[in-house]
Image (tube, rainbow, N blue to C red):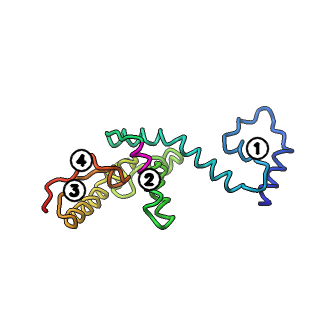
């Protein structure tokens, strides 16, 4: 907590020059926060509210990629289940990154650093966009095919390939075909 006190006292005495770029929401919050108790709760609440403001944009992008629309209640249930499905935080974080489109694809990393290849790290022949890396890549498609075969044999029915269901946990829009029961 000493670092927050130091940062707070420094921020209070610091006079920013007029030509300094405008501060973002995070910087303003840090500078304005002067209490020493409840720091973690304050920033936790801040991050949760920040994330909920951006979820509509994420939903729009997913619905465009999925070429399908889902009701807001379904998206909220999907977001909630992503945090309760897994026991280990590493899996929760991975699902969070996928769901909120925070996974760093080769295409995205190439925008940051042009020396990095924008090609998919699996097939090395197509641009590594979000959809390609998680669904369209030939190597990933092979993986999903094996998953489909295994699930179909376990549940004794043919299950359709559905990105929303497999990757995000959304209800299937294609459903189940040819039940063998």
- Mark 2 burial class by Cα count in 10 Å: few <14, some 14-19, many 20+: some
Residue picked out by circle 1: 32
Q: Earlier in the sequence, mark 3 or mark 4?
A: 3
* Residue shown at 63% from the left, 47% from the top: 46
Q: Earlier in the sequence, mark 2 or mark 1?
A: 1
Residue picked out by circle 4: 174
Query: In the figure, 159 relative to 65: above or below?
Result: below
Q: Nearer the viewer, residue 123 or 170?
A: 170
How many angstroms separate mark 3 from mark 4 (CA)? 9 Å
Residue 14 rendering spot, x and y as whole percentages: 84, 43
Residue 98's tag is: 2
Q: Which residues are magenta?
A: 73-81
Residue 159's tag is: 3
- Mark 1 burial class by Cα count in 10 Å: few <14, some 14-19, many 20+: few
Indicate left or right for 147 with 107 as reference: left
Which SS does the magenta portion mostly show? helix
- Mark 4 burial class by Cα count in 10 Å: few <14, some 14-19, many 20+: few
Q: Looking at this view, name the residue that lies furthest to the top.
A: 18
Residue 75 rendering spot, x and y as whole percentages: 41, 46
How many angstroms separate mark 2 from mark 4 (CA)? 21 Å
Q: Earlier in the sequence, mark 2 or mark 4?
A: 2
């Amino acid at each position: 907590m000493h670092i927050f006190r130091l940062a707070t006292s420094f921020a209070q005495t610091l006079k920013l020059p007029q030509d300094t770029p405008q501060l973002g929401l995070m910087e303003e919050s840090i500078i304005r926060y002067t209490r020493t108790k409840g720091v973690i709760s304050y920033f936790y609440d801040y991050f949760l509210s920040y994330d909920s403001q951006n979820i509509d944009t994420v939903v729009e992008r997913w619905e465009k990629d999925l070429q399908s629309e889902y009701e807001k209640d379904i998206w909220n249930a999907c977001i909630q289940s992503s945090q309760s499905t897994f026991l280990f935080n590493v899996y929760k974080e991975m699902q969070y990154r996928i769901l909120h489109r925070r996974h760093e694809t080769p295409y995205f990393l190439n925008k940051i650093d042009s020396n990095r290849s924008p090609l998919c790290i699996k097939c090395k022949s197509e641009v590594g966009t979000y959809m390609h890396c998680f669904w369209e890549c030939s190597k990933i498609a092979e993986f999903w095919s094996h998953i489909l075969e295994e699930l179909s044999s376990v549940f004794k029915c043919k299950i359709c390939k559905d990105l929303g269901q497999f990757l995000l946990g959304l209800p299937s829009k294609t459903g189940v075909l040819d039940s063998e029961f």
